[in-house]
Image: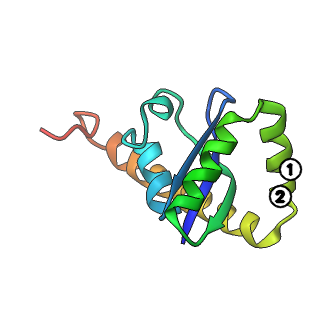
Amino acid sequence: MNYAYLLACADDSLYAGWTNDLRRRLAAHNDGTGSKYTRARRPVKFVYAEAFSTKEEAQKREYEIKKMRRSERLSLIRAGERRADMAALLSHINTEDAEQRRILNDGKEGHADGGRVQ
């Protein structure tokens, strides 16, 4: 499955992208390897996604979303919140990712060097 998605960034901006693995992509955005734009706006979380059978369809929808005004993107998010199946999936993925980041950060705080790899 392929997805076009919207992320809410820490600075309240919205980022559009596409992926074939929502969990992996959110983790990449939040560990700083996802995109240059989101690297400085972490943490991010999913607020919208649409599923497609092909990569090309997902990329086409991503392009359409990127061209939308913010108000149109917010309307899209509100409409997506009414789709219980996708809203539940995104909520679950966001929760898993936040918990994983919390665990990683707790481990770093316990090290005298701040958790840096030498």
Amino acid type, mark 1 = Arg
Q: Nearer the viewer, residue 88 or 108?
A: 88
The mark tally for this picture is 2
Q: Nearer the viewer, residue 116 or 53?
A: 53
SS state under label 2: helix
The reply to whether dot 2 and dot 1 touch (C-beta < 8 Å) is: yes
Tell me which residue sits at (43%, 54%) in the image: 103
Tell me which residue sits at (83%, 58%) in the image: 81
Up the image or down, 17 lies above or below 90; here it is above
CA distance for labels 2 and 1: 5 Å
Does residue 59 appear in this view? Answer: yes
Tell me which residue sits at (24%, 35%) in the image: 112
Amino acid type, mark 2 = Glu
Residue 43, horizontal then vertical, whole percent: 54, 39
SS state under label 1: helix
Tag 2: Cα neighbours inside 10 Å, few (<14), some, or many (≥20)? some
Tell me which residue sits at (61%, 59%) in the image: 95
Q: Quadrant of the C terminus?
A: top left
Q: Residue furthest left?
A: 118
Does residue 98 appear in this view? Answer: no
Q: Which residue is mark 1?
A: 78
| For residue 44, side relative to residue 49 (left or right) | left
| Mark sitting on residue 81 | 2
Tag 1: Cα neighbours inside 10 Å, few (<14), some, or many (≥20)? few
Q: Nearer the viewer, residue 59 or 3?
A: 59
Q: Quadrant of the N terminus?
A: bottom right
Up the image or down, 69 lies above or below 19; here it is above
| Mark sitting on residue 29 | none
Residue 116, horizontal then vertical, whole percent: 22, 37
Image quarter of residue 68? top right
Residue 29, horizontal then vertical, whole percent: 46, 44
**How is colour applied across the structure in the image?**
rainbow
